[in-house]
Image (cartoon, helix red, strand yellow):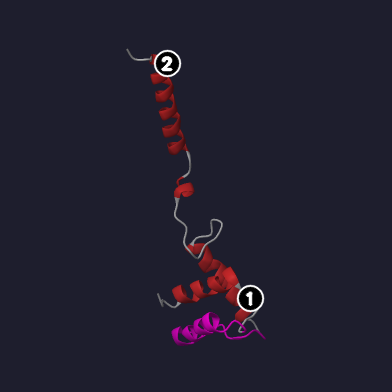
Amino acid sequence: MMNYNTLSSHTLLKLIAITLLIALPSSLFAIESPAGIGGIGLHNSYNLGKSIYLRKLACAGCPTDNKNLDSTTAKVLIDKLNGNEKFAGDLRGIKRQSVIVYLTHRYKMS
């Protein structure tokens, strides 16, 4: 003989779980880009990198002092950012990686 109280509680739990899965935003289940942290995906890394590049690398008196990059000079800049920690030394971690993401995607070097 089947225990209807147990069956109804299992059914109720299943309905609650299904309702929560439907109600929760799909962004909670999204896979993050390795370049992103704390909900920052590739698109936001690109925007952060662009902002940092313009403020810290392409401004007057900054290391590149050149807002008109092409793919060749962007590649040189990426190599400097990857290989020389002293170049633009105030850019570390996610900021440095975001600039690299920006330059890589902006100049289609993927």
Identify which residue is drawn at 51% across, 68% down.
Answer: 46
Q: Position of residue 59 (x, y in %)?
A: 64, 81
Residue where numbered disc 2 is placed: 5
72 is within the stretch colored magenta: yes
Of residue 103 and residue 70, the one placed in the foreground of this image is: 103
Q: Quadrant of the N terminus?
A: top left
State the image quarter where residue 31 is shown. bottom left
Q: Position of residue 17 (x, y in %)?
A: 44, 33
User: Which amino acid, mark 1?
Assistant: Arg
Judge whether residue 91 can be spotted in this image.
Answer: yes
The amino acid sitting under disc 2 is Asn
The percent position of residue 61, horizontal first and vertical second, equals 67, 86
Residue ID for mark 1: 55
Q: Is residue 12 above or below residue 39?
A: above
Q: Which residues are magenta?
A: 61-86
Please check the rendered image and state whether residue 83 is part of the magenta-colored stretch, yes or no. Answer: yes
Residue at the spot 49% in from the left edge and 76% down from the top edge: 103
Q: Secondary structure at mark 2?
A: helix
Q: Which numbered dot is residue 4?
A: none
**Distance of mark 1 from mark 2, alpha carbons?**
65 Å
Q: Nearer the viewer, residue 95 or 13?
A: 13
Mark 2 crowd level (few <14, some 14–19, many ≥20, 10 Å Cα): few
- Compared to residue 4, the image places residue 53 above or below, namely below
